[in-house]
Image (tube, coloured by chain):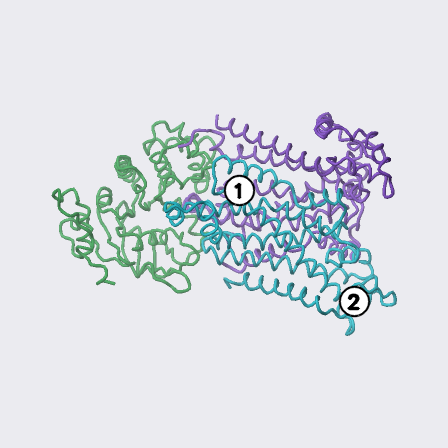
Chain colours: A cyan, B green, C purple
Amino acid sequence: MRRLSLWLGAALVALVVLMALVSLVWTPYDPTLVVPGQRLQNPSAAHWLGTDAMGIDVFSRLLIGAQTTIVVGVVSVSIAAVLGVPLGMLSGQAGGWVDEVVMRVTDIAYAFPALLLAILLAARFGASPVTAMIAIGLATIPSFARVTRAGTTQVMSSEFVLAARASGTRWPGVSMRHVLPNIAPLIGVQASVTFALAILAEAALSYLGLSTAAIVPTWGKMLRDAQSVMFSAPLQALWPGLAIAMAVLGFNLLGDGLRDLLDPRLREVT
Amino acid sequence: MTLLAVRDLTVRFGRRRLVAVDSISFDLGPRQRLGIIGESGSGKTVTALALMGLLPETAQVSGSIQLAGRELVGLPDSAIARLRGDLMSMVFQEPMTALDPTMRVGRQVAEVLLLHAGRSGGPARAQVIEMLHRVGLSDSERVADSYPHQLSGGQRQRCLLAMALINSPDLVICDEPTTALDVTVQAKVLRLLDEVLTAESAACVFISHDLAVVSQVCSDVLVMLDGRIVEAGPVARLFTAPEHPYTRGLVATSRIDEVPPGARLPTVEDFFPREQAR
Amino acid sequence: MRILAFLGRRLGIFALSLLGASLLVFAVCAALPGEVAAIILGEGATPDQIAKLTAQLGLDRPWPVRYAEWVGGMLRGDFGTSYFTGQNVLQLMAPRIAVTLWLVFFALVLSVLVAVPVGMLAAMKRRSWIGFVASAAAQLGMAIPAFWAAIALVLVFAVWLHQLPANGYVPLTTDPASWAAHLVLPVISLAIVQASVLVRYVRSAFIEVLSEDYYRTARAVGWRPFPALLRHGLRNAALSLVTVIGLQLASVLVGAIVIESVFALPGLGSQLLDAVSQRDLSIVQGVVMFLAAAVLLINFLVDLSYAWIDPRLRTGDER
């Protein structure tokens, strides 16, 4: 029971990853193949989840969509982590005015939502998955920086770091050998939660038509297509929505489960 | 006639049913003062919370607690809540955190009146001011209009005392009420407690780890160890002729002022080796 | 004095945030003026034509000058003009502000009204199945994309039950009943996600209150658990929740952009999306800055509300 969120989260995440991996080598049909004669078919043995308004096999599109989801998540989280973690470590180790400046800047950036930044970038550079990923990544830097800073200050005040510094270890050594390994689990939790956020943001963007290049099927795009036929084929909206919810739930639960595992004191609170 | 009769009170916690209080029994008459003494984890605070019906949901209580002839064990919380703050009340250990930081103190005291006596507005306020005055807060008007953070620890403890006493309860349970205070303030609050309990003719269960403190307020003492009562009797006898080795240790440690300079201070373990007992 | 220092500091942060946001918006939308002309002229424009139009629009001047002009204009209430139609951006926004405002306001109010009691219940019953169900429901609600919930609600209440309109908007002054009917589904779909996120914060804030000594005191003087939490917990929990609700506002606002698109509501969000698809950068610049300023202003007001909630800030002297 205690580990429920961890295992359920891991299972759902594994399922999404599995879908993406399978789609690399196999999909039942070509997920971009338009077959006008087979529009909006109900689920059947041939088409497990039916076909969409263009006659494309829904299950195949769903599998391929998992790829985009994983790629967008990995890239956005990487951008946020690569920039946010060093910033947070710098802030937590340097202290003083550096800390003050970094924290105030992240405070300010915190109020600027990922989706708004993505819309802004799409207006300027044109809508594409790349601008979406960059926007989500940049917008989540502050939360990574904050979590990292909190963890770093805690590690820096611990006995073993004081001992290491007293014996002459310089700060790059302290960062690499002591701080980073100790805050890695915290960053893992943050990465998992941010991953969920990135999936939701990307889905919203491709629903709005602000992320997807025409060919690449994503779950958000599928929902956009489904809405235009929702009166005649409501099931179309079900599958991609379920897929998004499953992926987001998976990463959120995984993050929660990890946090519980790492910090039993927080178990009650979060 | 007894006010409080406790029989075979047992409290277990959690799924593993760890025993915190193990079949204890005692009686308390009206206006009587009973000290419960023991180290942390001995079950004294759990006993107090059991009397008040404030144990967490994970606790299982068995046995019997009769207050003024009414059985409390097994009573639903809604029924016990009506008695709390009215027939019995409690003063806690941490005056610094036991008051709501976002509400004026006078209102917090008045709330207890409103809750049980249904009194509010002007008459309630007058009664609150008078009660604050009685617990030794001379500028009680100003205190009533203050937020907790504007008061000292001693003042806050007096406010809590006022909350506990304003409905003239028959029984006041004090859980280490002076432990968090400075030694000088501690002595003042104890003297005040003694006076006010007498004036209100309330009985008292006084919980402490300090025999010296208990002896200032109480006539009788229970000594608890690992959830059981190991010794009971008048304070004076416990000091002069303690029977249980653990009590002997407690008495010795409460008289460190009599230890000759340079000699090693006594510990409870000198009299009662724990490893052997466990 | 304490409160003045607090207010001064908050005001400073608010001003800096506005500065930061405006620089960001400007950098993205207007820092490279050549592109604006290229976008307006479309593909196939010669460099000469681009240079000429850039000069015509006054975009060939150094960026600090243009930035100052833009900010100065906004301070006077001039949010610029559309590059394509020459319409005043503020006038374009004006009729749409109310739509977005109603949507965001009701969604926020509804999510707080739902999340506070549910979160309190989840905290109090956290060891029983009731608490488990409340937490699980919050997890699910967080995972559902708002626009998917919107589509589902439309299917059920508009398509199958024919109880509510599927999309569109009627101004309050035209027909209040129809106005309300058109807002019900958008507000609910936006509030579901927000309420779910809030429930988790409310729950942890109240779990903290439950372990506080003053809660035990309240119980000891005879309050039952729920009234004790309401009377002595709400204000204390509000201290941490107010910040969260302020931060939530930003996500409600961007959520509104998506929801307006689902329900074809003529609000700021749909205007922004239209401008993005036409790549009318001056409208994008104006609307985004307006939205960002609104978020920052609310966060500033939220900060100020601390002074009202927390007497320790108001009265100053701390012991």
Q: Amino acid at mark 1?
A: Ser
Q: On the rendered image, what quadrant is the C terminus of chain C found in?
A: top left
Q: Secondary structure at mark 2?
A: loop
Q: Nearer the viewer, residue C305 or C177?
A: C305
User: Which residue corresponds to the image point at 39% horizontal and 50% vertical from the top-left?
Assistant: A160
- Is residue A109 rendered to the left or right of residue B247? right
Dot 2 crowding, Cα within 10 Å, few <14, some 14–19, many 20+: few
Q: Chain of mark 2?
A: A
Observer-side mark, 2 or 1, equals 2
- Residue B31 to residue C87: above or below: below
Q: Residue at x 72, y 40 (%)?
A: C102
Determine which residue is flagged by label 1. C240
Q: Position of residue A129 (x, y in %)?
A: 72, 52
Q: Amino acid at mark 2?
A: Asp
User: Depth check: A75 or C160 in front?
Assistant: A75
The image shows residue B144 at horizontal and vertical percentages of 41, 31
SS assignment at label 1: helix
Pointer 2 residue: A30
Q: Is residue A252 visible?
A: yes
| Residue B11 placement (x, y as % from top left) | 35, 59
> In the image, is residue A181 above or below residue C14?
below
Q: Nearer the viewer, residue C195 or B122?
A: C195
> Hey, which residue is sitting farthest bottom in the picture?
A45
Q: Are marks 2 and 1 in contact (CB under 8 Å)?
A: no
Question: Residue B217's spot in the image, x, y percent?
Answer: 24, 42
Rounded to the nearest whole Å, what is the CA distance between mark 2 and mark 1?
Answer: 51 Å
Chain designation of label 1: C
Mark number displayed over residue C161: none
From the viewer's perspective, tell me whether residue C106 is left or right of residue C317: right
Q: Name the residue located 13 percent from the left edge and 52 percent from the top edge.
A: B241
Mark 1 is surrounded, within 10 Å at the Cα level, by few (under 14), some (14 to 19) or many (20 or more) other residues, namely some
